[in-house]
């Protein structure tokens, strides 16, 4: 599922340029053209990130930021016009995550959005140490629950524990013996091919779900949960 971006800016030309670029980059977008509309759309759309202009009619960006922070911790990047009086300290105190001056450099915007979204995801993962989340995937060891594309998938406990362990240590390669030790326990007497069988079953459940991560075989070594974006 693409990250959802809410663009709140009263300039229709800037809003349209941002929308076209971000949708080309694979994001889903919504636009709002004043502060009151922005808050209303935010509540209905539930975006993953907000691009927020400061000088707007009805409610300015400062007020919108303040009201969003009362109900949500979703990341906010504030957009400031060149030459505009700008108080970065105020923005930080209100809870803004980053700032970018207009005219917006689209590549810089994209890089900053990715950085903010990564930080947000890392914070969410740390908030619940027994739950890890990636694109289209949520693994909760606390609930023993696997969600794929928002839907709960039936999975045996050991498959869930194996996936949770690999995902919690993403981009790290583990041998079969290490996985047997960490997931099944040091006193497990079964064959290391048990790992292969469980990986095969997990792949059947996760096939084609996302291009941002994969259960990867590292030949002659073992397995890893590889995050690519």
Image: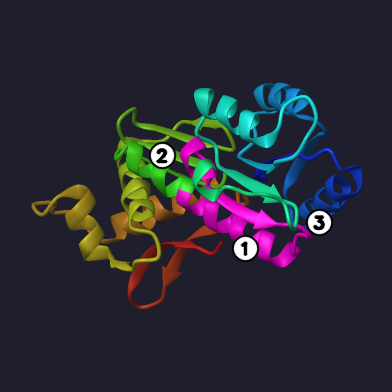
Q: Nearer the viewer, mark 2 or mark 1?
A: 1
Q: Where is residue 101 in the image (x, y as percent from the top left)?
A: 69, 58
Residue 55 vertical placement versus 118 (above, below): above
Of residues 54 and 128, the one drawn nearer to the viewer in this rendering: 54
Residue at 78% across, 36% down: 30
Residue 144 occupies quadrant: top left
Q: Give the range drawn in magenta.
A: 91-119
Residue at 33% across, 75% down: 221
Residue 139 numbered tag: 2
Residue at 39% across, 59% down: 170
Residue lying furthest bottom in this view? 220
Residue, disc 3: 21
Of residues 122 and 80, the one drawn nearer to the viewer in this rendering: 80
Quarter holding the N terminus?
A: top right
Residue 111 numbered tag: 1
Residue lying furthest left in this view? 187
Neighbours of disc 1 within 10 Å: few (<14), some (14-19), many (20+): few
């Amino acid at each position: 599922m693409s990250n959802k971006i809410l663009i709140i800016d009263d300039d229709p030309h800037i809003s349209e340029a941002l929308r076209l670029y971000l949708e080309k980059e694979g994001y889903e977008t919504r636009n709002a053209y004043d502060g009151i509309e922005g808050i209303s759309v935010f509540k209905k759309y539930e975006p993953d990130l907000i691009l927020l202009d400061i000088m707007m009619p009805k409610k300015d960006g400062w007020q919108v930021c303040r009201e969003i922070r009362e109900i949500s911790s979703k990341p906010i990047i504030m957009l400031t016009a060149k030459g505009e009086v700008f108080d970065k300290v105020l923005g930080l105190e209100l809870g803004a995550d980053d700032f970018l001056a207009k005219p917006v450099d689209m590549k810089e915007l994209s890089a900053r959005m990715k950085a903010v979204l990564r930080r947000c995801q890392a914070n969410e993962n740390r908030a619940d140490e027994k739950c890890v989340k990636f694109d289209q995937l949520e693994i909760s060891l606390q609930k023993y629950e696997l969600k794929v594309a928002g839907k709960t998938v039936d999975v045996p406990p050991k498959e869930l524990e194996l996936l949770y362990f690999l995902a919690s240590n993403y981009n790290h390669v583990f041998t079969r013996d290490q996985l047997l030790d960490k997931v099944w326990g040091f006193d497990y007497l079964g064959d290391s091919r048990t790992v292969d069988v469980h990986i095969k079953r997990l792949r059947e459940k996760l096939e084609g779900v996302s291009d941002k991560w994969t259960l990867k075989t590292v030949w002659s070594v073992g397995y890893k949960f590889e995050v690519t974006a």
